[in-house]
Image (spheres, helix red, strand yellow):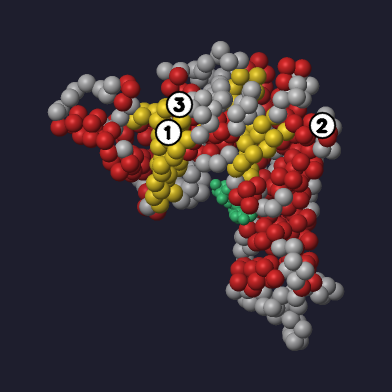
Amino acid sequence: MGIGEGLEKDGTSLSQIPTYVTAVPNGTEKGLYMAVDLGGTNFRVCSIQLNGDTTFNLTFSKVAIPKELMVAKTAQELFAFLAKQIELFLQTHHEEHFEKHVRRRLTQSASDGFKDEHVFRLGFTFSFPVQQIGINKGNLIRWTKGFDIPDAIGKDVCALLQDEIDKLHLPVKVAALVNDTVGTLMARSYSSPGKTGAVLGAIFGTGTNGAYVEKLANVKKPLSGEYDKSTGEMVINTEWGSFDNQLNVLPNTTWDIALDKQSVNPGIQMYEKRVSGMFLGEILRLVIIDLLKNKDVSFFRDDNSSSNDWKSTTNIAPASGIYAQWGLDTSIMSVAAADNTPELSTLRQSLESDLHVYSPAIDDAQAFKAISAAIVRRSARLSAVAIAAIVLQTGKLTDPESAGEPIDIGVDGSLVEHYPYFRDMIYEALRIVDGIGEEGAKRIRIGIAKDGSGVGAALIALVAAGME
Ligand code: ADP
């Protein structure tokens, strides 16, 4: 999968970004940490009490980012808003701590800093492309998802947040910059006790990506930031969504080609475009459009129509998402897979309510279900390729020291969480991969990492605090 190449140099199909996280938790970690998540429409603030017995308690608040701040003139405006939300969270959920250590300090005009033990360590999940240069340092490469504040480009986003936190005199230290896949890996490692922690954290949601534990000796490209060398390991963010952008090995159908051409980033994220939630519904939609245009096929056909226009001969309302790019949400594919009744009544209801297909016939619903299943099965099997590549890279299947131990993998995202049998289809494919087989697949344990972005970020803050 080009795993080795990405560890040697930049600019390859797999970016293999070093995260400077050098250990995964084992479930005994304890303490109260904070985490914030800026990834798109919302800003989440949470505090996490790690109980040290693989369990945790999470308190959180969520606020929509005002549209004008997404395109603010200065980064300071956005980050001041974020810091204000942290202040409000502390006031609401940690009032005692806030009163004791913030209010008093402000009113008594104390000039000294906070006592170290009163400072919350915070993990900052920031889902935009950053060049990470240390565990709590990363420069913004570019904005995505509707954000556009040119002033922030090239700046360290942790420092931007810390400056605004300090202006409010809050006892909070931005201890770690977190990618959501790393958070998933950490969350799974904490919650799933084993002799060794999890080896891989993977997201199958809007997009797909994975982060895994690599031996430091294998990381040949220069590491500029500071990190703890004693563990001999480092978590690597693969950015596997961009695997095989040159398309040498990935399947490429006419619908994949059409989807890519009409996307905002043609030729980029080619693996992701065949695997993740954002794209599966669109592939299905493009197949359906082709079938509707095909006069030789009877599919969602309005038998009373004598029109020549292909749209008028269907029993799909003009307002249906089937006619609009991205108009078919992947979640209906889960409905299709889950409905195993002879009449497919639930699916046919969803086709009516979600996609405005009038009185869909049973055999049309069956065809919809079959095509949908093929698209998701391909996605699951391709997901298995990425997982298999990482499992083989860890060497754990053949290492006598790990003999018989489970190989733990944490996953998150609506697709893997809600699509029925998605994990079973991954296992089905893993069993036939050379070097894994029946026995290897039995040792691979894939589990959902709940609240990955919150608890995972807290755990990275904990690791980072240990390095201070
Ligand atoms: P994100 O990855 O943005 O954090 P999610 O993990 O919720 O968020 O993933 C959202 C994606 O998952 C969307 O592309 C959506 O179409 C898809 N999705 C949402 N619900 C389901 C479902 N029940 N089954 C399959 N895909 C779903």
* Label disc, if present, on residue 30 of the rendered structure: 3
**Residue at the extreme left of the image, as rendered:** 108
- Find disc 2 in the rendering and name its residue: 439
* Numbered tag placed on residue 49 in the rendering: 1
Earlier residue among tags 3 and 2: 3
Across and down, in percent, residue 173 comes to 36, 28
User: Seen from this angle, which residue lies furthest top?
Assistant: 230
Quarter of the rendering containing residue 444 = top right
Which amino acid type is shown beneath numbered disc 2? Answer: Glu
Q: How far apart are the two marked residues, 2 and 1, measured between alpha carbons?
A: 38 Å
| N-terminal-most mark, 1 or 3 | 3
Secondary-structure class at tag 1: strand
Q: Residue furthest front?
A: 53
In the depicted view, which residue is nearer to us: 57 or 367?
57
Task: Tell me what residue is drawn at x 63 percent, y 26 percent.
Answer: 194
Side (left or right) of 406 relative to 125: right
Picture residue at 64% right of the left edge, 39% below the top = 447
Question: For the residue marked with disc 3, what is the amino acid?
Answer: Lys
Q: CA distance from mark 3 to mark 2?
A: 36 Å
| Crowd tier of the residue under label 3, counting other residues whose Cα lies within 10 Å: few below 14, some 14–19, many 20 or above | some
